[in-house]
Structure formats: C-alpha cells, structure tokens
C-alpha cells in the first residue's frame, strides 16, 4: 500500500506535547491507522505519557490506559481477559512502550504475557535511550553512544531483543522503522489478524536524544537500515523473512553503508570523531554489525 | 444455605467463586497458596465463572487486575507478605485509578529472616495506598467479608479497592464450619458490577495522563471522601448481610461485653477472637473489661473509638510495629481521642512473626493495666 492510500482517519490528534521531529508520533500515526478505532492502548512511563498532553485533554482518539513502568504487558493481559469475558475479542489490545519499558524494567511482564500466549500486540518504539527522563542509557543504547549516564560513551552493546522475543515462540515478531511507513503499516495490519502474542519493534531516531537536527529524523532511520545497524524483518512461526533493503543486505544484493556514515551525523557519537577519530571504537561498532549479519545468514539461510 | 467445614484459604476461594469475578490474576506465595490452588481447581472443573491469569509475579498480578478492572471486569486476587510488598506500587495505582479490585491478603511477617507465620506488618505497611482494609477473625468472617467487599468496592460512591486480611496459618490453614448461602441469594445480594469509568472504544478516554498540581489535590480529596463514605457503608452492608443470611461480625468494630466496662481492650485479626476468651475469663473474675475488635483499619473508625473512651480506659494490642514509633493501631487510637477524651490508653506489642499469643497472654497484658502494674509501652513476651 502506498502512503497516499493509508486510511484518512487520524487517531493521534493535533496538539500533542511531542518534540518537533518526534519519531514516536510518526510511528503512532501509522500504527493507529493500521489498527483502527477498535483499539485499546496501554502506555507505561515513556515519552508517549507526555505526548498525550495533560488532564483533562488528550491527543489520542482511542481509549488509553496509562500504567506504571514495569506493568504494561501484565495490564494488557488483564484487559484481554476482561474483553474475552465480554465477548469483545475483536478489540485490539496494544502495548505501546519505549525501549526502557521493554528491554529493562518491563521485560519480565512482557515475557510472562508472551509465555501465557496473551492475545495482544506489544509494540516497542525504540529510541535507544530513556528519553523522557532526559537521555539516560538503556539496555537498547548502542555501543559508544553518549548519554547522561554514559558520559564517555556506552561501553557495552545493546541486548539482542529480537532474539529474546523470538525465543518465546510467539506467532509474530517484526522489526520496523518510522522511515518506512508502508512497511510498518503492513506489519501492524498483519499482526492485527493473528491470534496470540505479537511483537513489533520500531526504530525511532530521537532528535534531542541522539543529538541531530529535527528535520533529519527520517534520514537517520533510513541510514540505520542502510548501514545494517537496524534490520527489518518478520519472523512468523519460525520462519524469518527480511524486508526491503534488509532483504537485499541479507541476500548480499545491497552493500551495507559503513556504520560511520550513520554515527557521524549524531551528536551523541561526536566523541568518536573529535578531537580525533576513534578508529578503534568505530571498528568495534562495525564488527558488531558485521557479525550480526553473519549470524543471521548462518541461522536463517 | 449449607454448612461447609474448610480452611480459611479454601473459604476465601469459595467466596471468590460465588462473587463471580470476571478476572482473577494471582501468583502463589505461602501461606496464600491454597487460595490460588483452589481457584485453579475450580477453573479446571469448569466451576469458575471468571478467567484466571497465572501471572509471573505479584506486581503483574495487581497490574493485570488493574487492566481487567479498567476494562469493566469484576476482579479478584490474593497474596501475602512479600507478594503484597512487591505489589506496593500497583496498590497505589489501583486506588488512584479508582478501581474496585478485591484482594485477600493472608497476613504473614516480612523477612529477612524468612518467616511464614502471622503478623500484620505486611498489610499495615500498605496503610496509605488508599485501599480499604478489613481484618477478619474467623473463617465465617472471611467468607462474609470477601463477598461484602465487592459490594463495598463497587459502590458508586466508593470505587476503591478492598483488602480482606486474615492471619496466616492461624486462619488460612485452620478448618472451621462456615454457613454458605445459596448461589442465587448471593447473586441477589451482589448484582453485576456497574463500572463508573471504562476503557471503551466507543467513548475513548485517556486515563491517568499527566495531571497538573492545580488538579492533583482534587483526586486525592475525592479518595478521602470515598473512604469516609466507606465508613458509613461497611456497617450498612454488614447489616444487610445479617438480615439476609444471619451471620454478623460487627461494623467498623465489633463490640464485645463493653457495657459498664472500666477498660476496653482493642485488638484485631485472629488475636481479636482470642481476646474474647480472655474477656470472658476476666469478666468471670469480676473485672469490668470489654473488647472492641477492630475490623476496619482503613477507613479508621475514629468516631467509634472515641465513643468507647467516654467511660473506659483503652488497652491496645498490636501484632505489628511501626518502627521508630510504636504499634500502629495504638498510635491511631490515641489520635482518635485527641482533644475530646481524658481516657488513658495503654499499649502492647505481641505476637510478631507468629509468636503464639493465647488468651492467657492477653489476660496477663490486660491485668498489668487493671492491677496498676503497667510500666509504659511494652513488648510482651520477648524471651531471653
């Protein structure tokens, strides 16, 4: 489906409290167009809790339950059970959580909900930091990135959340990026039709968090995919399918751009280039991405 | 109506079954475990109306209850001690979200060291979460109170969660006969829940978003008003139950032989039942002493306590301790009398971590006061 053919209905209303260039609102717009009116959102502490705007106003036109940081997947389980008793199983129950709420504090509840085969969609919008609290490291923050709690650059790589979720053997796992709205729309639409637990993780480049200009959000997402830092895929019933440029990368039909091209545009990685270029860390970052793709090929060819 | 002889935990599970919650989400913990096991057994046999979610922690148990209740479901859970402590964040959430969840908490001491026996420190530590808290002293009271709790929680003027507390092992694992009304009569007493707000796709609202300082105090004040309303409704609902089914355990407090008393003992939970034996014995000896067994800890029955002190001095036994202060009920009893009564209040701490407190111990504590041997606030029965 082309972008112009997406439904005209808007469920994210004008007047939200998001930053200019915010990837979360871009993602939410597409996601809610795919989900439609019969959707209940569960939102833990994250930027979206601010984007909603404050009581008694709201920038959402679907019912939304705010919930404590660690609690979203469990709350979704409760909603799903209640709706089942009411015979309203047509309603989409959707967690919309950040990477902190997914990779870190919310992982237990998420894992539990997946193990129980809860019929819901868990969407993680991953901006690779605790952005709501002012840019602290999370389990999703990449190696070498500056945050206010990794002042010299993060020393560790991010968790392989895709592998963690795939290990739960849920029927649908997908990655997406706000720079590819048709792909995102298609994936959410597909997840909506599948019973059981679905997981979609959306890369969400954050201008203030990553330190880039607010007009470059889309470009930052595209570069993440083209450098292979962020793979786009769907994993359905044990079968892996890479999508778009990631498919071409997987099949070696597209030569990945060097990660340096992505890193150098981000202020959070400025220390890798100034005052002098930190070849060692850039190489280590590149090697990690290379190894990820080698692992994909070993596992899924 | 039939008589069932069973343990406190099984009776709580039976009450939950008859209250017909749409959703139960729970996690096992000693000594609550046989509540969830019994519910699982009902589910397996197809005898349980609701959907049962076996969550992976108590934090998730309460979170799932919140989600379910927000979607309009009648919701039940059960926990104990560390489980209750793990829920703490979500207890606040449930109350502030004004969700009428009912939970039984099987009172158990807090570790370390690990101690699975009874005291009330686990639930009393949740005092300021906004939950209504009621202590039981018999299996019949567990049954009656659990079903009444749904009516109370779901009342349009209350809309607060209710915690029904009873002592681990002393009640949870002790069998007693319990009068169980017919299902249809309970259905009549407890009609279906009518949610006051709801996650509804046809009327989309955002619940719990950012609230500015100008508005936040209003939601707190509304909760306090709901607690005040509960103070009226707890006795009313208990009376209605008595009229329909014949069993009764008091309102906010249960008064026992308080007429012409020089002294009134205030105790709660299982210790409250044991106290009656001590009172009978002392009355036989001619001591003018009565008992006010505290049922409702939140809302706290300030007026009832004050009325006790009109002509009597008060003796309080706490099976819990607010460290750095004193027994929590002792403090609150004194606060209830401030500026309106010159009565004396004597306090004891007893039975922490399941240390046995018999009627003889209660008698000894009371006699220290009656015989003018009280030397100030006392930890009773500490050995060595």
Image: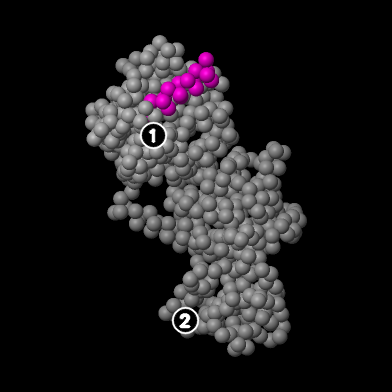
Residue A79 relative to residue A22: left or right: right
Using residue A265 as the reference point, say whether residue B342 is left or right of it. Answer: right
Residue positioned 65% across, 53% down in the render: B30
Disc number placed over residue A283 in the picture, else none: none
Residue highlighted by disc 2 = B341
* Dot 2: chain letter: B
Q: Callout 2: 10 Å neighbours few (<14), some, many (20+)?
A: some
Q: What is the quadrant of the C terminus of chain B in the image? A: bottom right
Relative to B277, does residue B368 appear above or below in the rendering? below
Determine the image quadrant of residue A4. Answer: top left
Vertical position of residue A258 compared to residue B153: above or below: above
Judge by depth and name the residue closer to the eye, B258 or B374: B374
In the image shown, does B281 or B28 lie closer to the viewer? B28
Would residue B96 be found to the left or right of residue B8 on screen?
left
Who's the residue at 51% across and 59% down the image?
A: B126
| Image: magenta residue range | A285-301
Q: Is circle 2 on the same chain as circle 1?
A: no
Is-magenta flag for residue A33?
A: no
x and y percentages locating residue A64 in the rendered image: 41, 38
């Amino acid at each position: 489906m082309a972008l112009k053919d997406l439904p005209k209905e808007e469920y994210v209303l004008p007047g939200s409290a998001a930053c200019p260039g915010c990837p979360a609102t871009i993602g939410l717009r597409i996601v809610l167009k795919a989900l439609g009116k019969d959707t209940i959102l569960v939102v833990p502490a994250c930027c979206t809790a601010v984007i909603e705007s404050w009581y008694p106003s709201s920038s959402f036109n679907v019912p939304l339950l705010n919930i404590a940081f660690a609690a979203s997947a469990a709350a979704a389980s409760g909603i799903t059970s209640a709706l089942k008793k009411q015979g309203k199983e047509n309603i989409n129950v959707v967690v919309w959580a950040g990477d902190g709420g997914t990779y870190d504090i919310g992982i237990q509840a998420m894992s539990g909900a997946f193990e129980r085969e809860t019929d819901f969609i868990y969407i993680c919008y991953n901006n690779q930091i605790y952005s709501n609290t002012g840019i602290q490291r999370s389990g999703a923050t990449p190696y070498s990135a500056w945050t206010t709690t990794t002042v010299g650059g993060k020393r560790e790589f991010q968790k392989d959340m895709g592998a963690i979720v795939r290990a739960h053997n849920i029927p649908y796992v997908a990655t997406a990026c706000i720079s590819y709205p048709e792909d995102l729309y298609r994936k959410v639409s597909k997840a909506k039709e599948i019973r059981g637990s679905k997981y979609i993780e959306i890369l969400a480049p954050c201008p203030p968090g990553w330190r880039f200009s607010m007009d470059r959000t889309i470009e930052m997402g595209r570069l993440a995919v083209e450098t292979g830092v962020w793979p786009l895929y769907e994993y359905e019933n044990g079968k892996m399918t890479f999508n778009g440029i990631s498919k071409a990368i997987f099949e070696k039909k597209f030569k990945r751009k060097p990660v340096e091209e992505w890193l150098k545009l981000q202020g959070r990685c400025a220390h890798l280039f100034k005052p002098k270029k930190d070849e060692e860390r850039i190489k280590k970052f590149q090697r990690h991405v290379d190894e990820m793709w080698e692992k994909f090929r070993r596992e899924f060819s | 109506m039939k008589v069932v002889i069973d343990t406190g935990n099984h009776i709580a599970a039976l009450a939950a079954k008859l209250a017909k919650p749409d959703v139960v989400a729970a996690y096992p913990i000693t000594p609550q475990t046989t509540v969830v096991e019994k519910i699982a057994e009902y589910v397996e046999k197809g005898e349980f109306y609701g959907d049962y979610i076996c969550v992976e922690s108590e934090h998730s148990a309460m979170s799932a209850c919140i989600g379910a209740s927000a979607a309009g479901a009648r919701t039940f859970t059960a926990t104990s001690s560390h489980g209750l402590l793990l829920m703490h964040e979500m207890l606040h959430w449930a109350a502030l979200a004004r969700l009428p969840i009912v939970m039984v908490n099987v009172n158990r001491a807090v570790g370390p060291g690990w101690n699975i026996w009874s005291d009330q420190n686990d639930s009393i530590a949740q005092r300021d979460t906004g939950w209504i808290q009621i202590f039981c002293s018999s299996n019949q009271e567990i049954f009656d109170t659990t079903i009444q709790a749904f009516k109370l929680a779901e009342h349009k003027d209350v809309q607060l969660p209710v915690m029904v507390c009873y002592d681990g092992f002393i009640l949870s694992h002790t069998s007693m006969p319990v009068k169980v009304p017919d299902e249809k009569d309970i259905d009549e007493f407890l009609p279906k829940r009518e949610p006051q707000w709801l996650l509804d796709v046809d009327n989309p609202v955002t619940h719990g978003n950012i609230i500015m300082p100008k508005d936040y105090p209003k939601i707190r004040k509304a909760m306090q008003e709901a607690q005040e309303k509960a103070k009226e409704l707890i006795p009313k609902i208990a009376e209605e139950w008595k009229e329909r089914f014949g069993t009764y355990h008091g309102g906010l407090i249960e008064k026992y032989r308080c007429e012409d008393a020089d002294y009134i003992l205030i105790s709660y939970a299982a210790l409250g039942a044991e106290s009656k034996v001590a009172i009978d014995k002392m009355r036989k000896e001619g001591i003018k002493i009565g008992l006010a067994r505290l049922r409702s800890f939140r809302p706290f029955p300030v007026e009832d306590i004050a009325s006790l002190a009109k002509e009597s001095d008060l003796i309080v036994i706490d099976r819990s301790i607010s460290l750095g202060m004193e027994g929590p009920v002792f403090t609150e009893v004194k606060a209830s009398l401030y500026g309106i009564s010159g009565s004396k209040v004597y306090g004891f701490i007893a039975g922490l971590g399941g240390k046995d407190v018999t009627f003889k111990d209660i008698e000894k504590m009371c006699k220290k006061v009656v015989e003018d041997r009280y030397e100030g606030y006392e930890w009773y029965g500490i050995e060595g």
